[in-house]
Image (spheres, rainbow, N blue to C red):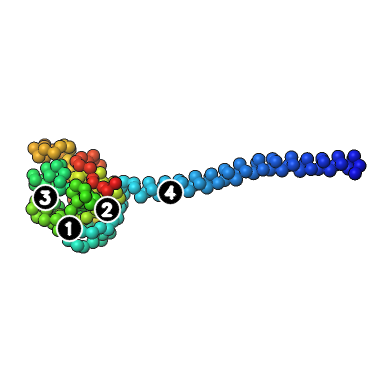
């Protein structure tokens, strides 16, 4: 092979190598970034879904729908209660703050007055098995009879699904839903966070005030308040 031919051959091979290297250098980062972009999108989708599932309900927005086993053996579906005002009361009969409001007659009187006006009052028990306040349906009914409590029914939420749906954190804690299915109140029972019965008469009762506003066709003045009491006894 002539020296000129040899030089041309070597030059072509060098050019091919030089062209190939930049292609690899440029292409691999692009593929990596594309893959990273896909992973990021998937991660954000899962994060958004998780946030949506566990988000607390928002006042003036539709209340989260649920279905749960009742103490009397029936199934309670919030969707079936459309057209009625619904009160959800998170409770735990062993919690001192709950005891305060039941032994004094405060919550039973609220229940009696509400039910007489056609309001659906649902106790919700979200104590997991083995946790404080966990009871079966028969025990829940006996407790209410003993305390003079008259809720429309009691929902047994031992798996915590309804509690988590509503972001329930305390017992007692209340959520009020208007006849259109809109959440109009969430929070505590009153303005004095104590387990002392003598404080009941001095406190502003947020639940009765919210129900009065709703009955009068007014927007609930204090639609969100801070609940107090024992923590809800979830499994985890």
Q: Total marks drawn? A: 4
- The mark lying in front, picked from 4 and 3, is 4
Distance of mark 2 from mark 3, alpha carbons? 26 Å
Q: Residue at x 14, y 42 (%)?
A: 96
Secondary structure under tag 2 reads: loop
Instruction: Tell me if label 3 and label 1 are in contact, CB under 8 Å.
Output: no
Secondary structure under tag 1 reads: helix
Instruction: Tell me if label 2 and label 3 are in contact, CB under 8 Å.
Output: no
Q: Which residue is mark 3?
A: 108
Q: Position of residue 117 (x, y in %)?
A: 14, 55
Of marks 3 and 1, which one's residue comes earlier in the chain? 3
Q: Nearer the viewer, residue 95 or 105?
A: 95
Quarter of the rendering occupied by the N terminus: top right
- The mark lying in front, picked from 2 and 4, is 2
Q: Which residue is mark 1?
A: 137
Q: Position of residue 213 (x, y in %)?
A: 19, 46
Residue count near mark 1 (Cα–Cα under 10 Å), binned few <14, some 14–19, many ≥20: some
Q: Which residue is mark 2?
A: 159
Of marks 2 and 1, which one's residue comes earlier in the chain? 1
Of marks 4 and 3, which one's residue comes earlier in the chain? 4
Instruction: Tell me if label 2 and label 4 are in contact, CB under 8 Å.
Output: no
Q: Which mark is residue 46?
A: 4
Q: Nearer the viewer, residue 97 or 182?
A: 97
Distance of mark 2 from mark 1, alpha carbons? 15 Å
- The mark lying in front, picked from 3 and 1, is 1
Instruction: Tell me if label 1 and label 4 are in contact, CB under 8 Å.
Output: no
Q: Residue 6 lies in what quarter of the image?
A: top right
Of marks 2 and 3, which one's residue comes earlier in the chain? 3
Of marks 1 and 4, which one's residue comes earlier in the chain? 4
């Amino acid at each position: 092979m002539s020296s000129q031919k040899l030089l041309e051959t070597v030059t072509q091979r060098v050019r091919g190598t030089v062209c190939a290297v930049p292609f690899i250098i440029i292409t691999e980062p692009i593929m990596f970034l594309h893959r990273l972009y896909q992973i990021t999108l998937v991660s954000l989708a899962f994060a958004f879904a998780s946030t949506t599932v566990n988000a607390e309900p928002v006042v003036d927005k539709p209340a989260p729908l649920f279905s749960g086993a009742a103490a009397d053996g029936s199934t309670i579906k919030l969707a079936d209660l459309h057209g009625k005002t619904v009160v959800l009361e998170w409770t735990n009969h062993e919690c001192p703050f709950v005891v305060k409001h039941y032994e004094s007659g405060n919550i039973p009187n609220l229940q009696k007055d509400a039910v007489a006006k056609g309001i659906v009052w649902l106790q919700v028990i979200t104590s997991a098995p083995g946790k404080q306040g966990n009871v079966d349906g028969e025990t829940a009914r006996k407790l209410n009879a003993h305390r003079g409590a008259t809720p429309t029914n009691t929902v047994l939420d031992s798996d915590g699904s309804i509690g988590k749906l509503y972001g329930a954190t305390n017992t007692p804690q209340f959520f009020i839903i208007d006849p259109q299915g809109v959440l109009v109140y969430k929070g505590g029972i009153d303005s004095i966070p104590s387990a002392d019965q003598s404080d009941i008469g001095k406190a502003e009762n947020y639940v009765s005030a919210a129900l009065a506003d709703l009955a009068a066709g007014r927007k609930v003045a204090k639609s969100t308040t801070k609940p107090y009491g024992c923590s809800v006894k979830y499994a985890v």
